[in-house]
Image (cartoon, rainbow, N blue to C red):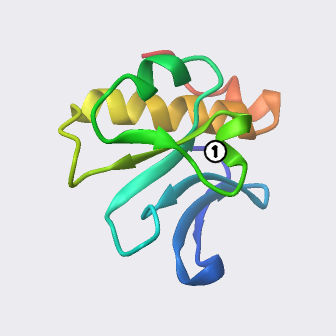
């Protein structure tokens, strides 16, 4: 993804674009999963097993956590959610450079 990079704030792996996080790798508490911002597909995501609103008030802004120990979501869905999160966080010009899937 354009200008995306991995960073390690708070001892956690994240993906950022222009200093803004668009994916958290790990859901805290030692569980393995991801956290993504889903302004469009959030309600659908929250209806899936293992998906919950993110803590620290992030859930109010469309962020969700996917706990892989409770979820067996297909790779394609997770990839689409990461794309959506990137588009939600990245400047509009960068988000527009992703091809539609």
On the image, the x and y values in percent for residue 26 come to 42, 64
Q: Residues within 10 Å of mark 1 (few under 14, many from 20)?
A: few
Quarter-wise, where is residue 97 in the image? top right
Residue at 73% x, 36% y: name it: 61
**7 shown above or below 24:** below
| Image quadrant where one finds the N terminus | top right
Please indicate, yes or no, whether residue 99 appears anywhere in the rendered image.
no
**55 shown above or below 8:** above
Tell me the residue that label 1 is attached to.
2
Q: Is residue 65 left or right of residue 73?
A: right
On the image, the x and y values in percent for residue 33 come to 35, 56
Please indicate, yes or no, whether residue 38 appears anywhere in the rendered image.
yes
Residue at 23% x, 33% y: name it: 73
Quarter-wise, where is residue 78 in the image? top left
* Mark 1, secondary structure of its residue: loop
| Image quadrant where one finds the C terminus | top left
On the image, the x and y values in percent for residue 84 come to 56, 28
On the image, the x and y values in percent for residue 81 come to 46, 31
Residue at 74% x, 40% y: name it: 90
**25 shown above or below 54:** below
């Amino acid at each position: 993804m354009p200008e995306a990079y991995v960073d390690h704030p708070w001892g956690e792996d994240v993906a950022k674009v222009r200093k803004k996080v668009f994916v958290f790798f790990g859901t805290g508490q030692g569980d393995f999963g991801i956290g993504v911002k889903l302004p469009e597909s959030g309600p659908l995501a929250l209806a899936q097993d293992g998906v919950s609103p993110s803590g620290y008030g992030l859930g109010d802004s469309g962020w969700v956590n996917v706990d892989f120990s409770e979820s067996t979501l297909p790779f394609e869905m997770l990839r689409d959610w990461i794309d959506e999160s990137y588009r939600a966080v990245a400047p509009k010009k960068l988000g527009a450079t992703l091809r539609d899937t």
